[in-house]
Image (tube, grey):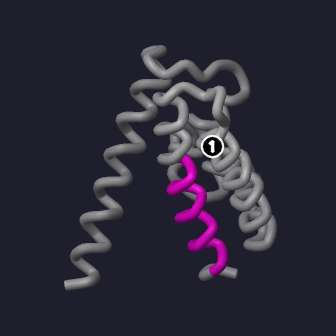
Amino acid sequence: MRYQLECIHSSTHELTEIDLVDELRTGRLPLAGEERQAAEELLGATGAEPRARLGLPADADADAVRRAAERQLARWRRCASHPGSTRAVRDAAEVLVQTCEELLAQARTDG
C-alpha cells in the first residue's frame, strides 16, 4: 500500500512539473533569463536524468550530483521564501524545491 501511495505521489509531482514547464514556456510564469533556464533544466526540459537536470556532464560522480542538488535546493528555497516573490513564483519554487529534494535523495542513495 505504501509503495502504491509513493507511486501516486511521484506521478502527481511529475504532472506538476510538466504543467510548470508549460507555464514557463508560455510566459504565464514571470521567471526570466538564467532563472527560467535553471528552472526548465531542473524540470527535465534538457533530459530526465538527474545529471542533465542539474546541468552536469553525464560522467559526473554521485558527490558532484549531491552538491549540485544541494545548491539548487538552497536557491529555490530562498526564492520560495522571498517576500518580494509573487505567489506564482513562490508556488513554482516550491515545486522546484520538491524536485531538488527528490534529486538529492536519489544522489544519496546512489552515492
In the displayed structure, 50 sits above or below 33; it is below
Q: Residue at x 73, y 72 (%)?
A: 62
Q: Which residue is mark 1?
A: 81
Residue 43: x, y in percent? 52, 43
Residue 50: x, y in percent? 60, 58
Number of labels in the image equals 1
Which three-letter amino acid code belongs to the residue tagged 1? Ser
Residue 23: x, y in percent? 42, 25
Task: Please tell me how crowded label 1 is: few (under 14), some (14-19), or many (20+) other residues with Cα within 10 Å.
Answer: some
> Along the line of sight, which residue is nearer the eye, 88 or 2?
88
Read off the magenta span.
96-108
Toward the top, the furthest residue is 27
Residue 49 falls in image quadrant: bottom right
Q: Residue at x 49, y 24 (%)?
A: 24
> Along the line of sight, which residue is nearer the eye, 65 or 97?
97
Q: Main secondary structure of the magenta part?
A: helix
Residue 64 falls in image quadrant: bottom right
> Along the line of sight, which residue is nearer the eye, 40 or 61?
40
Q: Is residue 53 left or right of residue 2?
A: right
Q: Is residue 42 left or right of residue 26?
A: right
Q: Residue at x 36, y 35 (%)?
A: 19
> Along the line of sight, which residue is nearer the eye, 88 or 21?
88
Q: Residue at x 40, y 27 (%)?
A: 22
Which quadrant does the N terminus fall into?
bottom left
Q: Is residue 9 left or right of residue 92?
A: left
For numbered disc 1, what is the local secondary structure?
Answer: helix
Which quadrant does the C terminus fall into?
bottom right
